Amino acid sequence: MMNKTHGRAGAVVAVSVVAALALVGCGGSDGDGKEAGGDEQITLTIATFNEFGMDPLIEEYQQLHPEIKIEHKRAATSDEARENMYSKIAAGSGLSDIEYVEVDWMPELLKYSEYLNDLSDPAVEGRWLDWKLKGGMDAEGRLIGYGLDVGPEAICYRADLFEQAGLPTDRAEVAELFGGDNASWEKYFEVGRQYLQAAPDGSKWFDEAASIYQGMVNQLEYPYEDQDDNVIADTNPDVKALYDQVTAAALDDGLSAGLAQWNDDWGQAFQNGAFATILCPSWILGPIQDYAAGVTGWDVANVFPGGGGNWGGSYATVPTQTKHFDEAKAFALWLTAPEQQVKTFENAGLFPSTPDATTDPAVTGYSHTFFNNAPTGEIYAERAEAVTVLPHKGPNYFAVQNTAMIPALRRVDVDKTDTAQASWDKFVDEIQQYK
Amino acid sequence: MAKTKATRPEAGRPVRKIGFRQRLGRWDVKLSPYLYVSPFFIVFAVVGMFPLLYTAYVSMFDWHLLGGKGEFVGLGNYEFILGQHNFWVAMRNTLSIFVISSVPQVTAAIGIAWVLDANIRAKTFWRMGVLLPYVVAPVAVSVIFSRMFADQFGLVNSVLGGIGIDPIRWHADPLASHFVISVMVWYRWTGYNTLICLAAMQAVPRDLYEAAVIDGASKAKQFFSVTIPQIRPTIIFVIITATIGCLQIFDEPRMYDQFGQGGSDHQWMTATLYLYQLGWNQEMNFGRAASVAWLLFMVIGVIAVFNFALTRRIASDSPDHSAKVRKTAKTRGAVKR
């Protein structure tokens, strides 16, 4: 009898201890389980966003390196990718071996570059455009990100809608229409007013004020923060002038379709012809082709108001959380090499950031079938040359732009809940917290 | 047996050493019960208590998402949050969505359970049917509903347009957006609560209904005077869990548009969404996010207690009622006799 109870007590103790240990164990490492047993296959994970045309590249790399298996996680938007990346840095686990980072939030990430590996390598000497290379380095000069694409901007337009409104349809003529080399925003809005007079029912000039504003603000040298990264967004007269100009064009002139970019309505609108033009950074060609499947008439004009602009672009980083640094770095090295950048350009329309790729005949000679065989390679190479100003983006740029300015414009243009002035006042309130 | 011998040493004699086995036996009696229930408490301490207290700790510091712990600021974060206009907007949205989503949901759940409790054909089919939406992932629900309720080209607005109603601005008008988010909650949670209520209803003794029928009580009277008082503890449970769930709502508002900020004018930014924005989106300030978490915790606590009291009050003419039922039962017995 005694023996029996003794045994039971022992069992209880044992069970509790095991349970406690198991619980503690949960907090520990659990990431190693991914490798397949005998054949030493390594699984690399890679996190991207939007459309990088990854599938053929991944397949090719897996064929080149049979020992490597690649898992691709794709976030719908760059915001989503950013939130995912930050929470996993904070959690200390869960990051992919390679994380794609957008230039808008690269600066704030660079402040915490200790979570990312130094990718310096003699093999990448002279690989990138100078400014692209600099954007991937932290304050100590460690190379944190390998440059992927840049986003030189052109204007995409619906030639069929232009025709119905009595505007020229040829892409060279359209470029001239906006002023050619001297294209200005004023001229762009003026043509818009002209378009509206004869436009098909329900068709507007551009998708939303916020996307036009993006193009405009990327031409300012110090939009939201000064050289010392003090937030000046509310006091910068240039920002206010752009805000006034774009809200006036959207509302007073009625040029805007009021469709928040990337929202359901916006995607749907490509099927409805709700707008005739859209600012066209090279990476947006892929999404437009997806959304506008079956629609004919999209074309790209080799012109951009206000003298060239760059919107977006991205870097490949390798977080320190990775357990396969060498393999991940090798893969990132391969992905950002000129040859692969050329392929990415062909697959997804992302414009290369390496001079070897931009001068590659496969890029310069490329024409895009969906966009009426527009020579997009040549167009974007020229558009990239037209970029003169690269805005200073400090650690608060992303927050000011995406959580204060874009919502401010959408209140006026999409939701129509506020007047331009009331919404500006809210914007000013909102950004006080970053000061 | 052995134990009693050991605990009563005889006076005068030196205390006899207790054998190890005996001591073990004594521990067994004293400790085993605690050990048996310990797994729950260990789990609770690790996944419940610790995060709660750690959040309180974090809320006292200037704490950056990536930069980690900074200076101690005491209640500074709370002071800052309470002074923020956005916090109060978030509270307004949270309470509004809570009311719109939970009240019809629980009411409908009880009503549907009552119907399912009746003797209907294909019972199992209907019972499983109501649970089906619960299987759909909340994010999927949000994506589908936000598309259906898109402002310009959404299905719902086209249907409304077809019958001559002006399109409703589901993503611009605060109340309209709260309504859509509540619809998602109804869709997912009504069936779940229905099954819980149904289980409780099936445990109600059938002779109470017989007695009521003999007394000439209508179906409605039976429902309010027998069913409701009898399943009161379950109703309290359902209301409390629905309260907590609706006040913590996150997935649905987060996925209601592509940007996850709760609307350009914070139309549907709930408290949890606000917390998330503070911690991850804007300044990546964990301290402030943690203080919002604690404020929300307290609000939920207050509302849960209030609801608990209210539910007890509402359904608690039951002593009265059960007395009545008992009386009728007695009279019935008397008549029978």
Image (cartoon, grey):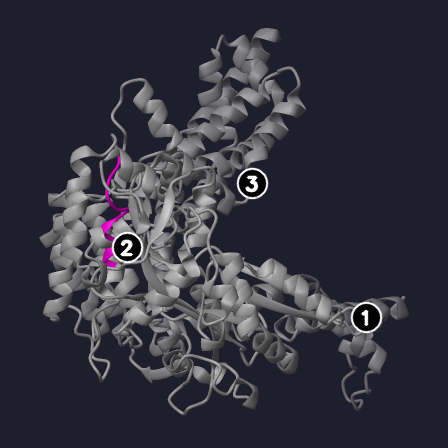
* Mark 1 Cα shell of 10 Å, populated few (<14), some (14-19), many (≥20): few
Quarter of the image where the N terminus of chain A is located: bottom right
> Residues at badges 1 and 3 in contact (C-beta under 8 Å)?
no
Question: Residue beneath label 2, please?
Answer: A211
Q: Chain of mark 2?
A: A
Question: Residue beneath label 1, please?
Answer: A37
Q: In the image, which residues are magenta?
A: A203-213
Q: Position of residue B155 (x, y in %)?
A: 39, 29
Position of B114 compared to A201: left or right? right
Up the image or down, A343 lies above or below B89; here it is below
* Mark 3 Cα shell of 10 Å, populated few (<14), some (14-19), many (≥20): few
Up the image or down, A378 lies above or below B126; here it is below
Q: Chain of mark 1?
A: A
Question: Residue beneath label 3, please?
Answer: B136
Q: Camera-side residue: B83 or B240?
A: B83
Kindly indicate whether the residues beneath marks 3 and 2 are on one polypeptide chain.
Answer: no
**Would you say residue A117 sits in the magenta stretch?**
no
Q: Secondary structure at mark 1?
A: loop
> Residues at badges 2 and 1 in contact (C-beta under 8 Å)?
no
Q: Chain of mark 3?
A: B
> Residues at badges 3 and 2 in contact (C-beta under 8 Å)?
no
Q: Is residue A311 visible?
A: no
**Would you say residue A208 sits in the magenta stretch?**
yes
Position of A311 compared to A216: left or right? right
Sequence-first tag of 2 and 1? 1
Q: Give the quadrant of residue B47.
A: bottom right
Q: In the rendered structure, which amino acid carries the disc numbered 2?
A: Ser
